[in-house]
Amino acid sequence: MSEARRGRPCPLCEEPMQHRHCKYVCPEHGVVYDCSDTFW
């Protein structure tokens, strides 16, 4: 069972980001946003 799921597109490259715990992770750029980013 995977903890990751597809999410919003990365603002840098448009790849679908994975949502893990409290972070959005781009496969190319690493962590892009986390839950403390209120602008997302």
Image: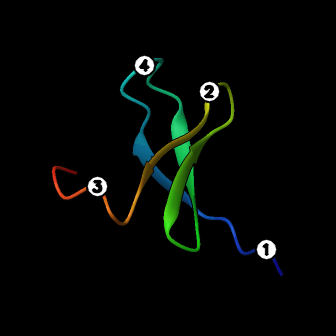
**Residue holding disc 3:** 37
Q: Are marks 4 and 1 in contact (CB under 8 Å)?
A: no
Mark toward the start of the polypeptide (2 vs 1): 1
Cα–Cα gap, marks 4 and 1:
25 Å
The circle drawn on residue 2 is 1
Cα–Cα gap, marks 2 and 3:
17 Å
List x then y, in percent, for residue 11: 36, 26
Q: Looking at the image, is mark 2 or mark 1 nearer the viewer? A: 2
List x then y, in percent, for residue 18: 59, 53
List x then y, in percent, for residue 7: 46, 54
Q: Secondary structure at mark 3?
A: loop
* CA neighbours of label 3 inside 10 A, class few (<14), some (14 to 19), many (20+): few
Residue 39 falls left or right of residue 14: left
Nearer-the-camera pick, 2 or 35: 35
Q: Quadrant of residue 14?
A: top left
Cα–Cα gap, marks 4 and 2:
8 Å
Q: Are marks 4 and 3 in contact (CB under 8 Å)?
A: no
